[in-house]
Image: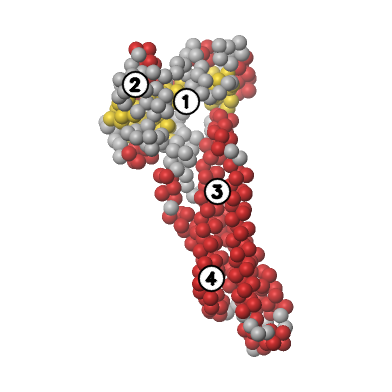
Amino acid sequence: MPPFRLVWKNLLRHRTRALLTAASLAVAIFLLCVLRSLLVVLESGIKASASNRLIVQSSVSLFVYLPESYEAKLERIEGVERVVRWNWFGGYYQEPKNFFAQFATDVEDLFEVYPEIELVEGSQEDFFGDRRACVIGSEMARKFNMRVGDTMPVIGGLFPRTDGQPWDFRIAGIYHSVKPNVDNNTLFFHADFLQKALESGAANGPEGVGIFVLRLEPGADRVRVAETVDALFAGGPQRTQTTTEAEFQAQFVSMVGNVPFFVGSIGGGVLIAILLATLNTMLMAAREQTRDIGVLKALGFRDGTVFGLMLGQSMLLTGVGGMGGLLIALSSERFFAQLLGTAFPGYHIAAETVVEAVIATLLIGVLAGIVPALRARKLSVLTALRSVG
């Protein structure tokens, strides 16, 4: 077993070099945690998707709307239990930087089709009974300091009011989603409220429905239902593309690009760079300690002890840097969750990310220390004492 006091003193022989190496490793582990967490957030929505929901959209594009008349036809398809409309509203609160998701939907079906959406404040009855009412996510309520009963003015993006005024929604409830496939930064309001405004000329915007969400009956064959839907509307006026909820979520991940490759390339490059930097630091340290190693061996210290001395320095150096980076990532979790709330809702440092960071730190410590440790082990007393040091 190496003398740990000697490990510490040798490591601090060049404090600036050791500090800069540890700081570099801290930055690398911090970046690894952040990049990995972004990937986990993107994948979590796919993994948490329900198996009994199908998404019906235009086969041309998500931005091409489907006719309202499709809803009644979808409800008559065997295996379909409920149908709910989702229309992207595309507005913002007060100023463009306060952008978040808003959907006009069939509110009485929303909670049935999406049981993971649970009201934590307010009531469904109040929400259902007032056409101007809305429910908002718990994260959004916290961000904008909103409470049940407050009025939330939203500037229409896709659906601006003709008088130039914002849409005033009364908050009837605050929800919290227990699954990551629905984030807690969204506003839901009555599709009928939007439809009446369009019909009366009080607002402008595209007519129709963005997507239909189908909840299937227990035991229904998803593939058969999807094929039936697409065959039903194959002749138009809008052809449809029906997918599972997981496939629909995956479309948004693919819009960002090949995220796993991007994260893997960046994270791998950073780790290789810091591994080489740490290895260089340890090789320099081993060269400077050559005479010391000779003295230790002359005093009777075994080769294994000398090996452990060099490897221990590497493990201590990388351990301090790696744990520092991990602590920075964990302490900044809330900051990044707020910063990335709209683009990456549900950002957090998962337990598996922490484990991966610890493993990466240990591997760097071993790989950076093994070469100088083996050299020190094989070094003869005579060669070491002849060294200029």
Tag 4 residue: 18
Is disc 1 surrounded by few (<14), some (14 to 19) or many (20+) residues within 10 Å? many
Q: Which of marks 4 and 3 is nearer the N terminus?
A: 4
Q: Which of marks 2 and 4 is nearer the N terminus?
A: 4
Tag 3 residue: 36
Locate residue 37 relative to residue 308 in the image: left or right.
Answer: left
Tag 1 residue: 113
Q: Which label belongs to residue 161?
A: 2
- For the residue pair 320 and 75, the one nearer the viewer reads as 320
Task: Examine the image and state in which quarter residue 244 appears.
Answer: top right
Q: How far across and down, in percent of the image, does residue 186 sit?
A: 41, 33
Is disc 3 surrounded by few (<14), some (14 to 19) or many (20+) residues within 10 Å? many
Q: Which of marks 3 and 2 is nearer the N terminus?
A: 3
The mark closer to the camera, 4 or 3, is 4
- In the rendered image, the residue lying farthest to the bottom is 299
Q: Which amino acid does label 1 sit on?
A: Val
Q: Which colour scheme is used?
A: secondary structure
Q: Which of marks 1 and 2 is nearer the N terminus?
A: 1
Is disc 4 surrounded by few (<14), some (14 to 19) or many (20+) residues within 10 Å? many
Question: How far apart are the alpha carbons under marks 1 and 4?
Answer: 57 Å
**Residue plotted at (56% across, 78% down):** 10
The mark closer to the camera, 1 or 3, is 3
Q: Which amino acid does label 3 sit on?
A: Arg
**Residue plotted at (35% across, 28% down):** 155
Q: Earlier in the sequence, mark 1 or mark 4?
A: 4
The mark closer to the camera, 1 or 2, is 2
Q: What residue type is labelled 2?
A: Arg
